[in-house]
Structures are given as structure tokens and as C-alpha cells.
Amino acid sequence: MLTGLSHLAREARSWPFEQARILLARHLKLRLDSDAERDLAATLIEAGKIGEALDALPALRRPVVFQCGYGASGLPHLGTFGEVARPTMVRAAFRALTDDAIPTRLIVVSDDMDGLRKIPDNVPNRQILEEDRDKPVTSVRDPFGEHPSFGDHNNARLRAFLDGFGFDYEFVSATQCYRSGRFDEVLLRVLERFDQVQAIMLPTLGEERRATYSPFLPISPKSGRVLQAPTLERRLDAGTIVFPDEDGTLTEVPVTGGAVKLQWRPDWAARWTALEVDYEMSGKDLVDSSRISSRVCKVLGGEPPEGFHYELFMDEHNQKISKSKGNGLTMEEWLRYGAPESLAYYMFVSPKSAKRLYFDVIPKATDEYLQHLDGYNRGAGAANRLDNPVWSVHAGEPPGKSSPVSFSLLLNLVSAANASDKTILWGFLSRYLPGATPKSEPLLDRLAGYALNYYEDFVLPAKQFRPPSDKERAAFADLAARLRRLPAGRQDAELVQNEVYEAGKAAGFEPLRTWFQALYEVLLGQSQGPRFGSFAAIFGLDNTLGLIESALRPEAAATSKLDL
């Protein structure tokens, strides 16, 4: 439940709550007619009397509308997830801030009226798309043969994608908005205020484009294609425009009823106006476009939404991620190696800072998410629990239990055990966690599956064992002797970790991290690993000693592994 949290929400400092407070101020400004009403509302809300504010000022009950867009010429992807996940976080913060008394809506608009300009590479029957090129994607035949159109196919994939993550949203088709008349009023306003719109748009274009630019893109009655054609005449009384069709014939069409669509910046502005959008996020590459669309929105009599511009993701080489280049991670790849919660957490963290998006970030993001979830459930960490990232990741309802084993520890368990399936892992886990089962620890069980996939695809191909140096060999022998001397029943993680420290210090490793690096490189075939005491506790002391003894044999070499 998101009620009873307004006192915490007013003090929360994480970015979704900062945005929620901005959005509430906007709501008071737009929905109330006088400063006196706004002051009264602010006073009551500050005192936590949201219900009294709504009773006194019914206009506040108008829903606050969040919007995000989807390009229907392609399948949903990782960016699509972020487009919906981040506004959902702000929406949850707003609901907490207002005790969930002011209605909210999140609408996901599919730009399925856009002409199909580029043919995707990953579809069958490409000749169908070539033949239908430049038609609205909802008029392009479905190359998969499953839906009435290619746009309908992608829209169905979008809804299944969003439903699979449990998002609360309303789907809106741009095609239906144009054809049903939902956009008619604002389209007639564009026609009426054509010159004002042009005055904003033309200075943003190159000289050649300016010569023929029109905010209207007519759809040819003959070919069905979306045309970049100049508007030669406007007939306000009839609500029509005249343009040259593809064959040069002067053609008159109404601007309503789906006979035209708008260029994308005026379209953005018209959508904000028609749907009365209050909040929309976009990447920093759209800052200028958002500013231009906001000016057009005001010309059309609308109020531009509050905006938030997030940084774009980079690949491992700090290059901008591009769908055409195929660099960076895909949605499917993240979900093969990490939980959806870890992806949502990665979307939450520092949205205004550029972050690299490649495979190595998944284990780190997963463990950070688990740490925050554990801290939330223990009441530790952030002074205000609403500032804990997992509150926003789970829209105010984080699960009551984290994983008792970190993802990095699971990865090293898979590596040391050379595990190929969950059964092997649970053989260790059930000894480390008496009574634990996949059913009692579902998150841990899911993480085990991700760890197996990650190990198979990334860790195993890169494993390079090395024999220990003379200094390391002596330290390994000392560590083995120390571990054998541990009293029965006292072989816990902390006790083992202390002996590892002592062995490293006794051997004179300086800094001490070089000792731990040697442990990982010699025993696990990698340069990094988890806290060694925790690893030994879950892997088992006898098995850990087996690894060490294997490394101490004269024949120990780059392929050494414990045979379990």
C-alpha cells in the first residue's frame, strides 16, 4: 500500500521523490484557479491532510498523466524497459507523496502511425516489408503472418513484454488516436495555427528541408504511403490541405480522421495537448527536440509536461549504444544473466550520469540490489526507507526477503565446483543453509540459474589457472595447516577469513590484496572473487582444502580443478 507515507515522501531525497514534488507543484498550479486555493492546498497537503484538500478543492482529483512512447517499427528492447520503469518509479513516489489520493495514469503510446522507413534485419519475408515501405506500420503486412499488420504484431509484443514485468499501464495506439477522432481537435488547431507552428519549426531545419516542410504528413489516397509533401493550400472552413501526390496530382485530404499524421516534433506536442500529459522522460539527445515541442504545445493551447532528461548508456568502450551497431546489451542478454530486479535497479541508479551497459555490470548490479534489499528489510542504510533504491524498484512494495548468498559468491561456487546444473549448486547450498530449498529460497534459486549461464558464457572461456610462486606456495601450505587446526564445529566464514588474513600477513604480502588475488588466480582461475571466508563456508572446508592441496602438488598447472 502507498498510503500513510506522505510524511516520509516529503523528506525523501532520491530523484523519483524530487520529481514527484515538482509534479505535485505543477498539479496545484494548473488545476487551481487562484493563489488562495493553491496556498490552501499546499497547507493541507503539507499537514498530511490530503483528503481534506481534495474535498475542499475537487479539481485536484483530475488524474495526473504519465506518458512514454514506443517506436512500433521494431521490437521492444532494453531502452523500452527503461522508458516505462523510470516513470513508474516517479509515479510510485507521487502516489506516496499524495497518500494515493490523487489519481494517476501511465499511458504507453505506440507510434504505429509512423511510416516504415527502415526494414529490420531480424524479420522473415522481408520482401513484404519492402513492398509496403513508407506506409504506416499498422498498414504494413505482418511478415510473421500472425496479426493484421506489422504494427499490430509489434504492439502485441510490447504488451506481452510490459505485462511480463508486471507494469501497470494503459496502451494507446497512435493510429487509433488519429483514425478515431481523438486527435481531431488538436489537428484542426495545427491547421488553424499553421503559420505559428512553421515559425517555430522552420528555423530548426536546413535550407533544403525548409523549402518543402509542412507539419502535416499526408497519407497518399493512391499508394497509402506517408509522404513528405509540401502543403500547397490550407482550407480552414473545410478542415483540409492540398498537396502534390506521388504522381504530381494535386490532392485534397482532411487533416482529421487519419488522412494525415504530424511530423514527429509537432506530433509530440499534439499528443501532449490531446492527452493532457503531465510528465514524460526522455534521453538527453532529445533535449532540443523537447524544447521545440514544448513551444509548439503552447501554440496549440496545451501545457508542456514536466520533463526529465536522462543520460544515455555507453558500451564497454564508452561508445554510445546503437541498435544499428549492435553494441551494448540486449534485453534478452541481461535477462539470461541477471534478474529483472537488477535491471530496474541499474535504471534507478544515477539516471543523469552516463553508465556503461555491458555484461560485466550485471553481477555488480545484482549484488548491489541484494545489499539494498537486505538493508531495507533490516531497517538499515538510508535514514529514510523510501530513499532505499529497492523501494522505487518495486514501486513501494519490496519483497520481504533477500538472497542469503550473493551473486558473486554463487559465481565462484559454480566456478570451483565446475557445476553444470542447479542440482550441484543446491548440494552445497543446502549444507550451508540447513533446510533451504528452491521453494523456500526462490530468489536464490533464480540467481543460481543466472550464475550458471554467466559462468558458462563468460567465466569458463576466460579461466586461466596458474601455479603458485614459491612465496605463494609457502603461504598456501600455511593456510592449509591453519584450516586443519580449526576446532570442529567452528569452521564458519569469519573464522576462516581470519585465518586467511593471518596467513597472508605472516607471508609478508603487501598490500594484502595481492594475497587474495593469488588465491583467486591459483585456486579459481580468475583475478577476482568474493570474500574468501564466505566462499569456504559455502563450498565446504574439506573441498576448499582440496583446492589448496591440488595447487600445492608439483604437477599443479593451468588446468587444475577440483574433481567433485
Image (tube, rainbow, N blue to C red):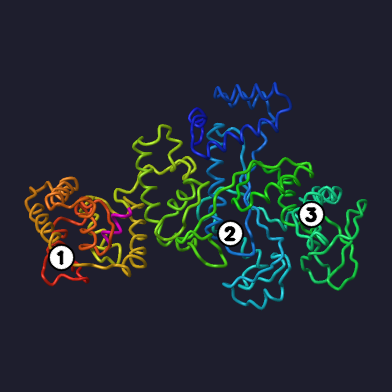
What residue is disc 1 on? Answer: 551
Give the alpha-carbon distance from disc 1 to disc 3, as whole Å: 72 Å
Give the alpha-carbon distance from disc 2 to disc 3, as whole Å: 34 Å
Query: In the rendering, which numbered label is found on residue 158?
Result: 2
Q: Which residues are magenta?
A: 407-414
Task: Say which residue appears at 54% left-offset and 52% top-offset.
Answer: 82
For discs 2 and 3, the disc positioned in front in the rendered view: 3
Q: Mark 2–mark 3 contact, CB under 8 Å?
A: no
For discs 1 and 3, the disc positioned in front in the rendered view: 3
Using residue 151 as the reference point, say whether residue 422 is left or right of it: left
Label 1 SS: helix
Q: Quadrant of residue 224?
A: bottom right
> Reading the chain from its start, which is encountered first: label 2 or label 3?
2
Task: Say which residue appears at 17% left-offset and 56% top-offset.
Answer: 540
Using the image as rendered, state which of residue 45 and residue 480 is in the foreground: 480
Mark 2, residues whose alpha carbon is within 10 Å: few (<14), some, or many (≥20)? many
Label 2 SS: helix
Most common secondary structure along the magenta stretch: helix
Task: Say which residue appears at 50% left-offset and 48% top-offset.
Answer: 353
Q: Position of residue 476 (x, y in %)?
A: 13, 58
Using the image as rendered, state which of residue 491 and residue 443 is in the foreground: 491
Query: In the rendering, which numbered label is found on residue 250?
Result: none
What residue is disc 3 on? Answer: 202
Label 3 SS: helix
The amino acid type found where label 2 is placed reads Leu
